Image (cartoon, grey):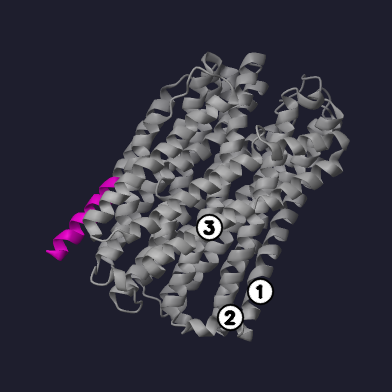
Amino acid sequence: MAGIEIIFTLGFVTLAGILAIIFALLFSAWILKQPKGEKKISDLSDRIYEGAMTFLNSEYKPLTGFVVIVAIIILLTSIPNQAAYAFIVGAFSSALAGNIGMRIATKSNSRAAVGAKEEISKGLKIGFSSGAVMGMMVVGLALVGLTVIWNFAPDPSIIIGFGFGASSIALFARVGGGIYTKSADMGADLVGKVEEKIPEDDPRNPAVIADNVGDNVGDVAGMGADLFESYAGSIISAITIGYAVTQNQVNIPILSGLGTKLILYPLLLAAFGVLAAMIATGLVRPGRGSDIGSLHSALNKGVFGSAIIMAIFAFLLTYKYLGVIDPFYAMISGLAAGIVIGLASEYFTESRFGPTRSIAEASQTGPATNIVTGFSIGLSSTLIPVLAVCAAIGLSYYFAGLYGIPIAAVGMLSTLGMTLATDTYGPVNDNAAGIAEMGEMGSEVRERAEKLDAVGNTTAAIGKGFAIGSAALTSIALFAAYISKVGISPSLLSIQQPMVMIGLFIGGLLTFVFSALTMSAVGKGASAMVKEVRRQFKEMAGILEGETEPEYQRCIEISTNTGLRNMVLPGGLAIVVPILVGLWNPQVLGGLLAGAIVTGLLLAITLANSGGAWDNAKKYIEEGNLGGKGSEAHAAAVTGDTVGDPFKDTSGPALNILIKVMSMVSLLFVPLFI
């Protein structure tokens, strides 16, 4: 009977994943039926699409080599051979989700602009639908991949390979995409807006297409791969600890006797989360209002609606399937923490609230006060998310022991299909605003697209906060799984142990070195872009008069080469250092993971929220406040926004992958360490 129950359960989870993929394909079909716009608009969209695919195809070449090499290394070690195949499947699934998501996003941008011309709510609907494609593809492919692997090889040591494959692609996609997008964005702004005083997204700017491409490679493909890895990682960590409970390696009295149900429960939670997200997409219906608040409210209906539906599903599932309700409370603590973190990010980065407006007001006295105020906002914004994560850890452990922590992470990510949809909405409408400007669609369309873009900035900030919070919880769950699997006594992880203290400092150091490398890469890329844009303005007569078309492709090549060349070292650090430290001393590695999680969480929140607040402070002034465009306050805000670009779109988001990758690689290579 137990065997039939397992087959039925895995079949149900697989079916939920397939339904999510079908749902994504239906959204894609609807989007592609929408009008693409007249030739000029259509051509701009095609250029962005081609640039994005050029980057992805270039990125896949070195990543394919990396995947093959790592798979061979796994085959040659004492790690189960099947883990190598799971690693390949995880890497392929993550890359496929990002590829499909970015294809649809770059096909949706002009359609969102044309939709906004008809009605602002139409632009929002197209942008959200595009995001839903990415959200549903991520959860669908992850669930199908995990259940297929577990069905053929029910061993945590093997399924961890799937998570490591997803982690590897996420790391390089996030780092490479982040460097690409901010190299282009900063180069375009520094010469175009600051030096030549031309508007943002002006077609006379040679870097404008590369900038619009960057929105997709960083915040669509990169974010999708990031959250694919978190989603899979949280489920894998819950399966690993659940398996340890069934093998009596971890003692949790309240869960004793549940057997394989503890392994299947996180998969079922994720499956019901997919259904909740699918139902909640119907709640995203913009009202008649065209202000930013009402537009944002339309997206919030989906986010909060999916959370409420999921809470009901989870209660019924836990009560009926497990027979004990305690894991439900652990799951709810994670789900609630995710919502709190998202709302905190909204408060600290949205121009409706005090923190961002204080940055705008500080801009009246120059760029220095703008930057100091913005950075202080980022630092103070760590308070609520950290307390939320602490509460989730404490409550989940109280209710379900060590098993509760990964269940809280699964709960936080259970409605990822919806939260990722609202996040990916941002870059699509950012592109739509750019196309409206470049395609000369008129001031009314540009104004509507700017409002949709402003909402997107907030959803992106919320998405980054959510990604960082889920990364922290997932990493802690993976850390717990590592401790369980490596067999280190808790007393040996005390800070009284010198080796643990060494590990704590190394882990903390890694997050700062990693941030330095990624920011330095953006600086180099931006410098190269500035030189190229200046060269074209100087050597190609008629660009600023609109008589000569700039060499857009040259700027795309610079961003692509910069991103690919500079993603290797920081990505390599995340994988090589934990393995070397683990081979030296697993105790030191335990300290390293703990140190990286703490400093990585704090630093990532600071960077992401300060960058988001600087961006929206600039937009607040551009709406006509404090002197509007062209004022001294606006010039200062542009400087702050430019400084914040690598904060919020490169180093900050990449840090959450860093801590997850190090935890995942440590868990996978445990057989070598012991």
Name the dominant secondary structure of the magenta segment. helix
Residue at which label 2 appears: 588
Q: Position of residue 8 (x, y in %)?
A: 18, 55
The quadrant in which residue 150 appears is: bottom left
Q: Position of residue 120 (x, y in %)?
A: 54, 19
- Left or right: residue 33 compared with residue 440: left
Q: What amino acid is labelled 2 in the image? A: Val
Assess disc 3: are there few (<14), some (14-19) or many (≥20) residues with their C-alpha within 10 Å of its C-alpha.
many
Q: Position of residue 130 (x, y in %)?
A: 47, 33
Residue at far left of view? 1
In space, the residues marked 3 and 2 are separated at their CA atoms by 24 Å
What segment is highlighted magenta in the picture? 1-17
Magenta span includes 6: yes
Nearer-the-camera pick, 541 or 559: 559
Q: Is residue 218 visible?
A: no
Dot 1 and dot 3 residues touching (CB under 8 Å):
no
Disc assigned to residue 557 = none
Seen in the picture, residue 403 relative to 143 is either above or below; the reply is: below
Q: What amino acid is labelled 1 in the image? A: Ile
Q: What amino acid is labelled 3 in the image? A: Val
Disc assigned to residue 389 = 3
Residue at which label 1 appears: 506
